[in-house]
Amino acid sequence: MPHIRFLFSLVLSLTLVALLTGCPSNLAPPSGDASISIAPQTKVLVAGDPAQVLTAVVTNSSEVPSWSLEPATGAGTLSSNTGTSNSYTPPSSLTNPLTVLITAKLSTGQSSKAAFQINPKTANPTLELTPSSLTLKAGTGLISPIIANLQNVAGDIAWSLTPNLGELLEPSNNGVGYRAPSSVASTTTVILTGKIGNLTKTVTITLNPADPVTQDPSLSLSPSSQTLFAGGSDVLFQSTVLNSSNNVEWKISPEVGQLLNKTNQGVIYRPPSSVDAPTTVTLTATAGNLVKTSTIIINPQVVVAPSLDLTPSSLTLKAGSAIIS
């Protein structure tokens, strides 16, 4: 666009020269007549620029000049209507370029003009990311939106993570979604970067480790039932305690038989030497609020009475015979 700017500047210069030189009041007056001249007489400004100071020099007269603006509306403001100096403030915004004429005039008709060219403010390219920081827990699976506000820039935002932990979802010029990784060993900082042209913005993401998985305490007891004979062999009952620091306590009800080698891993049950009738004993393991039971059925010992059998039970023999057994 350099050639367009050159033509615009050339047209502006010619316009300003025409405006200024076309005013008879700017010509040198005859010697002894009052005259006025303001400075500066030309300037190129941008809408929203700070105030500009103008000075009016009056010769052969003690009169204080009056000031005016053309056009009367939308051209900015003067700090005063009279005086040998003044301040001009351009309008805060413009859609199209505007030529503003500033006139200092004496009551006797002499005047001097300044022509200021006011150009629209050029919008600066901007990129903003919201929020600027996040604190997340690993393993949640939640998607956190990052909103991008891109102005006056053509092209696409390039998104990246440093270090590359987590996942970027549906990246666009409107923003991106971020999903934390399933786990991190310790608190970790990740920088999410959005870049387009010379514009770069970042979001600081703090990743904390996931909450430890908590499991309910449990107690198991095996076997859950057993049938024994009085006077029979000892039986091992095994217990397993998970997620609990409580010790296992053992008891039997009724107290028929004995419990030996009580530990958190199990107990040995020794049946009684005899019972008169089948008896049910409940073995109970307790660890804190956890309770498990096993059922033990004890049958009387089977007693076999002594006996003698002879075979065969009868014989028929002849005299003089012999029997060999």
Image (cartoon, helix red, strand yellow):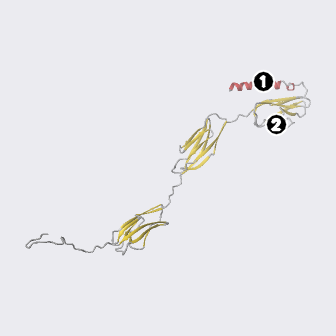
Label 2 vs label 1: CA separation? 25 Å
Q: Residue at x 40, y 71 (%)?
A: 280
What residue type is disc 2 on?
Answer: Thr
Q: Residue at x 85, y 29 (%)?
A: 112
Number of on-image labels: 2
**Vertical relation: 83 (above or below) 209:** above
Label 2 crowd (10 A; few <14 / some 14-19 / many >=20)? some
Residue 277 falls in image quadrant = bottom left
**In this rendering, position of residue 34 left or right of residue 293:** right
> Which residue extends farthest bottom?
276
**Vertical relation: 323 (above or below) 220:** below
Work out whether mark 2 precedes mark 1 in sequence or the reverse, and give the earlier one. 1
The spot of residue 52 in percent (x, y) is: 79, 35
What residue type is disc 1 on?
Answer: Leu
Quickly name the residue at label 1.
14
- Quadrant placement of the C terminus: bottom left
Residue 57 falls in image quadrant = top right
**Vertical relation: 65 (above or below) 253:** above
- Quadrant placement of the N terminus: top right
The spot of residue 239 in percent (x, y) is: 42, 64
Which of these two is toward me, 129 or 297?
297
**In this rendering, position of residue 285 left or right of residue 130:** left
Q: Which numbered disc covers residue 162?
A: none
The spot of residue 272 in percent (x, y) is: 36, 73
CB under 8 Å between callouts 2 and 1?
no
The spot of residue 108 in percent (x, y) is: 92, 29
Which of these two is toward me, 67 or 298?
298
Q: Which numbered disc covers residue 77?
A: 2
As helix, strand or loop, the secondary structure at mark 1 comes to helix
